[in-house]
Image (spheres, rainbow, N blue to C red):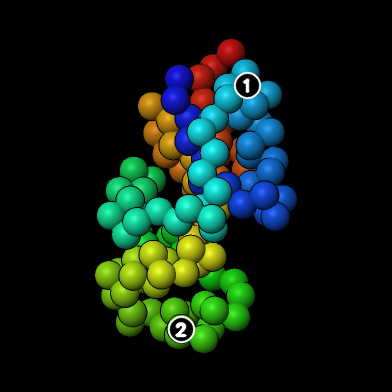
Amino acid sequence: MTVTIYHNPACGTSRTVLGMIQDAGITPEIVLYLKTPPSREKLEELVKQTGLTPRGLLRQKGALYEELGLANEDISDEAILDAMAAHPELINRPIVVTPLGAHLCRPKELVLEILPKP
């Protein structure tokens, strides 16, 4: 089973979810998205796969979120995708993609819904 995690090792939730995947006996493909950011097209694909909106994948913490005015509800989905593509630190994490589905794993237990049952 191919499992991909969009991972930030500095994030406790991301580290926990990675551990949960590994505890299930799976060696995931780890995308360190801050070092190798997904393209805008890939972000659009992740939005579709997770069933969220671009705002749903947007990390709503930090100075950059405020500086770019992303709290404004009138900002378009396209502008949010552009911001995340230009500034990958705005992508919320961890995002996990498996053949069983894709989730932004917050809370961390959501990963269990898309991993094979033991």
- Image-quadrant location for residue 27: top right
Looking at the image, residue 16 lies above or below residue 85 = above
- Image quarter (top left, top right, bottom left or bottom right) of the N terminus: top left
- Residue at figure coordinates x 34%, y 56% from the top left: 39
Query: Taking 106 as reference, is 42 left or right?
Result: left
Residue at 70% in and 55% down: 10
Q: Quadrant of the C terminus?
A: top right
Residue 49 versus residue 55 in the image, above or below: above
Q: Position of residue 43 (x, y in %)?
A: 35, 55
Sequence-first disc among 2 and 1: 1
Asked whether disc 2 touches disc 1, contact meaning CB atoms under 8 Å apart, the reply is no
Where in the figure is residue 103, as x and y percent of width and height?
46, 43
Question: Badge 1 local density, few (<14 within 10 Å), some, or many (20+)?
Answer: few
Residue at left offset 61%, top offset 75%:
62
Q: Residues within 10 Å of mark 2 (few under 14, many from 20)?
A: few
The residue positioned farthest toward the top in the image shown = 118
Residue marked by disc 2: 68
Residue 77, how many percent across, how many down? Answer: 30, 69
Q: Disc 1 marks which residue?
A: 24
User: At 43% from the left edge and 30% from the top edge, which residue is drawn?
Assistant: 98
Q: Secondary structure at mark 2?
A: loop
For badge 1, the amino acid type reads Ala
Find residue 7 and name its label.
Answer: none
| Distance from Cα at disc 2 to Cα at disc 1 | 39 Å
Mark 2: amino acid: Leu
